Amino acid sequence: MNTTAFPTAAPAAELITLRDASVQFGSVKALQPLDLVLHRGDRLALIGANGCGKTTLLRLLHGLQPPSSGERRVHALQGRAPVQAMLFQRPFLLHLSVRLNLRLALWLAGVPGSEHAERMAEALHRVGLETTVQRQARALSGGQQQRLALARAWMLRPDILFLDEPTASLDPGSKREVEALIDEFARAGMTIVMSTHNLGQVKRLASRVIYLEAGRRVVDWPADRFFTDVLPPEAALFLKGELPWH
Amino acid sequence: MTAFAESFSLAIDLIAQADATLLHIVGLSLRVSFTACLVGALAGLWLGAWLAVARFPGHRLLVWGVNTLLALPSVVVGLLVYLLLSRSGPLGSWGILFTPTAMVVAQSILVVPLIAALTRRIVLDGLRDGGDQLRSMGAGELTAAALVLLHERFAVLTVLLTAFCRAIAEVGAVMVVGGNIDGMTRVMTTAIALETSKGDLPLALALGMLLLGVVGLLNGAIGLLPAREVQEAQRLV
């Protein structure tokens, strides 16, 4: 396999480990067997063309997709399972008010009722949606809905935040707002795993990049190396296509 | 045309006079079908949600069975319930044959497959959109299905209205297990059947119009619900 391992200077805590994990849908190999370690504090970007396996790897890491072979291990963090949350390209918000959407998420996560009000207020303040608490979540604009979904995820105080093309369907202004929030969360210590087509976003947000092609991991490098070093030919071609000025 | 005009005028007269017998028939029809829908909803919503998320050997066969039962003739349901509740039947000791309770039982059986099949479809579609998100937030399969039903509550309401319409409009089952006893188990559809057999077609048609009017009113009230919610949302903005 033409893969370069990500060298860790100082070993950070391991959060999720994949060992020879693959995903197959019927006769289609969506993800070839791979070993992968997600460390605490990683800002991992998964990139590649459509259908290359980014979302499958994201779902596998999050636990939404069980491996067809191999194993996925979640490591304890300070004696407990790390809290995980995921943000989807099109956030799924229930046909309920903003308040009820947030309350349901807290209830599902098992957060005690006494903490609900404080966490909701804090999360809405964080994403600048304090005034929308009584509004129907689905009546918000696309950017506001994505920010609300971010608030819903952040409110759970996740150790790992998975993002599936979080700004793909947003206008430039909303894109900037959502990116700024993700950056803020990462700076606060949250581990980020994100699939994206946007290489500018990778440059701005990621510390580590995995390039996938046809379900195979081709590159797993620190982000600064990814944009400066000589890449394997298939990754170089992808980068060239995405960044014509590179 | 004359028969229709006469029937229409008769229907208006019947309503205007607020005839006690007619009010009893309309009231009993609504009560029986509403209760049957409630019972059917408890069973059908759960069954539909479970069928949408459960996977076990024979699952497809069960789904096929429920879908096939959508075409269950009401008179066959009536016959089965009659056999169960008749004195020589396994549930004969209950002594509820030819009572409104028996009619509720028959109509409940009639609407359960309808509610279950449509609920399963709603849950499947909802989970396709938001299943990953709900599971990601920690919802189990049945909880996710329940949340989808909450999310799609107006679609669920439409399903329940459809079931209510199926129940209130059927005649075969209530005729067999209710017996169309005047003042006891006579509902609108059995009254229509009786008046038709007696040759009083204008009265039969007038009762038919009343039946449609009652369902129309209910439908209109439910149709207004989403609009009210939107208005409420706009008011809060």
Image (cartoon, rainbow, N blue to C red):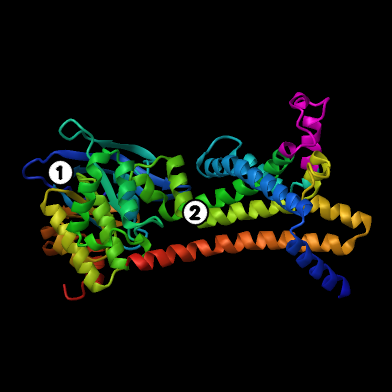
| Residue located beneath label 1 in the image | A40
Say which chain tag 1 marks: A
Q: Secondary structure at mark 2?
A: helix
Disc 1 secondary structure class: loop
User: Visible in this render: residue A22?
Assistant: yes
- Outermost front residue: B17
Q: Looking at the picture, which amino acid does disc 1 mark?
A: Arg
Residue drawn at 76 percent across, 67 percent down: B12
In the image, residue B60 sits, relative to residue A79, either above or below, namely below
Q: Please give the residue where the numbered disc 2 appears in the rendered image.
A: B153
Query: Depth check: B81 or B237 in front?
Result: B237
Chain name for mark 2: B
Q: Position of residue B188 (x, y in %)?
A: 77, 53
Query: For the point 83% across and 25% down, which residue is it?
Result: B88
- Disc ID at residue A105: none
Establish if A87 lies above or below B116: below
Figure quadrant of residue B214: bottom right
In this view, the residue in front, A117 or A162, is A117
Q: Position of residue A119 (x, y in %)?
A: 21, 48
Q: Amino acid at mark 2?
A: Arg
